[in-house]
Image (cartoon, rainbow, N blue to C red):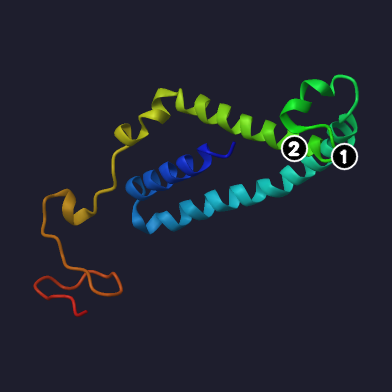
Amino acid sequence: MMVPSPAVNATAMGLIQAKVPPDLQGRVMAVLTQFSTVLIPLAYLLVGPLADTIVEPAVGQPGWEVFAPLVGATPGSGMGLIMVAAGALLVITTLAVYAVPYIRNAERTIPDYVPEGLADGGPVLPVDVVGAPTPAGQMAVL
């Protein structure tokens, strides 16, 4: 059920690289990484008690037969149900976000980053090995 994750991540990284100036991309990536890293302990704090006190004790109880064909009725099936539910939530969230026209059309509506030298039609300077522009008229040494 984690199929949308690579597609969403690839799309987001492509948008960031095309729309954010190179000198700010590291900061944007750091904020995104920090945000996702902070959410991991929160997920552990929520899912652990949910599995231990609610879902795992429900395995084999009346009403579990609804979920048994999907995840089984053995120990650990409750955790399987949480994983299936998380995957389904990911798919639903992905579809809901994609349904928002502004987000779906972000590649067209948000302007691409254009370096200053190219914005006014000026000359494109060659780039040396470390990535810094070389003085006009000189070739980069490789």
Q: Position of residue 29 (x, y in %)?
A: 48, 53
Helix, strand or loop at mark 1: helix
Q: Residue at x 32, y 47 (%)?
A: 18
In the image: residue 83, left or right of residue 34:
right
Q: Residue at x 46, y 27 (%)?
A: 98
Is residue 92 or residue 123 the one in the foreground?
A: 92
Q: Position of residue 139 (x, y in %)?
A: 13, 75
Label 2: how many residues lie within 10 Å, few (<14), some (14-19) or many (20+)? some
Helix, strand or loop at mark 2: helix
Is residue 32 or residue 47 the one in the foreground?
A: 47
The residue furthest left is: 137
Q: Position of residue 83 (x, y in %)?
A: 70, 37
Q: Position of residue 56 (x, y in %)?
A: 86, 35
Q: Residue at x 40, y 23 (%)?
A: 101
Q: Identify which amino acid the numbered label 2 is placed on.
A: Gly
Cα separation, mark 1 vs mark 2, equals 13 Å
The N terminus lies in quadrant: top right
Tell me where residue 49 sits by quadrant: top right
The C terminus lies in quadrant: bottom left
Report the residue marked by disc 1. Answer: 52
Is residue 53 or residue 73 the one in the foreground?
A: 73
In the image: residue 34, left or right of residue 29:
right
Report the residue marked by disc 2. Answer: 80
Label 1–label 2 contact, CB within 8 A: no
- Of the image marks 1 and 2, the number of the one nearer the N terminus: 1
Label 1: how many residues lie within 10 Å, few (<14), some (14-19) or many (20+)? few
Is residue 119 or residue 17 the one in the foreground?
A: 17
Front disc: 1 or 2: 2
Q: Identify which amino acid the numbered label 1 is placed on.
A: Asp
Q: Residue at x 78, y 20 (%)?
A: 66
